């Protein structure tokens, strides 16, 4: 399964995604991919409303793999572990954009970019993705220059 745009953003659906990224990439469908979010009835109801009319599914990792995603789809994952499970299940993204990852409450983290906090466990998940041949970049907005992500982990000793 290849072709879908994959973004890591623990804010999930917000203006940067629904306006800037969807226009830039020609996205016509959003898939929020995270088991906990998919199990939350309120989030399943509210997230599609935040998508400004774009068809939106809120799915578990397993369900995301089952429905598939094409080149006009953006998969928005909440955590790097979600993306790693997608890759283990057969998803082959051209690139994963680590867009915005706010610190998890109570977790020890390191800021590796202005909008990306990384815990030791998350660093392991990012490195597993890279080892699986998945290119990782960080790019907050479409007009920002993408930055290779793994060297940022290296610089911070993660």
Image: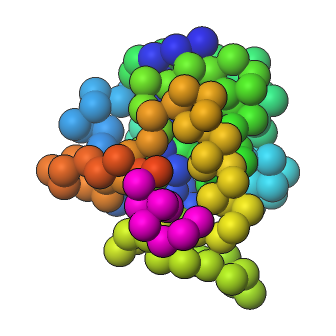
Q: Nearer the viewer, residue 108 or 154?
A: 154
Span shown in magenta: 151-158
Quadrant of the frame with the C terminus:
bottom right
Vertical placement of residue 7 versus 41, above or below: above
Task: Name the residue located 54 percent from the left edge and 78 percent from the top edge.
Answer: 110
Q: Position of residue 107 (x, y in %)?
A: 72, 81
- Furthest-left residue in this view: 143
Question: From the viewer's perspective, is 14 left or right of 19?
Answer: right
Within the image, what quadrant is residue 85 found in? top right
Instruction: Indicate whether residue 111 is drawn in magenta.
Output: no
Quadrant of the frame with the N terminus:
top right
Task: Name the residue located 74 percent from the left edge and 54 percent from the top edge.
Answer: 37
Q: How many marks?
A: 0
Vertical placement of residue 85 versus 65, above or below: below
Question: From the viewer's perspective, is 60 left or right of 11?
Answer: right
Q: Position of residue 3 (x, y in %)?
A: 45, 17
Question: From the viewer's perspective, is 41 left or right of 24?
Answer: right
Q: Position of residue 152 (x, y in %)?
A: 41, 61
Within the image, what quadrant is residue 46 found in? bottom right
Task: Name the residue located 29 percent from the left edge and 51 percent from the top edge.
Answer: 147
Q: Is residue 29 visible?
A: no
Q: Main secondary structure of the magenta part?
A: helix
Q: Nearer the viewer, residue 151 or 36?
A: 151
Task: Name the residue located 80 percent from the left edge and 29 percent from the top edge.
Answer: 62
Q: Is residue 23 visible?
A: yes
Q: Position of residue 134 (x, y in %)?
A: 52, 31
- Furthest-bottom residue in this view: 106
Q: Nearer the viewer, residue 3 or 20?
A: 3
């Amino acid at each position: 399964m290849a072709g879908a745009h994959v973004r890591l953003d623990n804010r999930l659906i917000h203006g940067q995604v629904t306006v800037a990224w969807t226009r830039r990439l020609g996205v016509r469908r959003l898939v929020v991919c995270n088991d906990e979010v998919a199990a939350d009835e309120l989030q399943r109801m509210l997230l599609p409303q935040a998508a400004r009319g774009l068809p939106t599914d809120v799915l578990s990792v397993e369900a995301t793999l089952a429905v598939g995603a094409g080149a006009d789809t953006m998969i928005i994952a909440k955590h790097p572990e979600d993306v790693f499970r997608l890759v283990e299940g057969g998803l082959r993204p051209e690139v994963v954009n680590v867009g915005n990852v706010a610190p998890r409450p109570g977790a020890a983290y390191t800021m590796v970019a202005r909008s990306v906090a990384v815990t030791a466990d998350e660093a392991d998940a990012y490195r597993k993705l890279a080892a699986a041949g998945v290119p990782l970049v960080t790019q907050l907005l479409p007009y920002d220059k993408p930055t290779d992500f793994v060297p940022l982990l290296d610089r911070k000793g993660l």
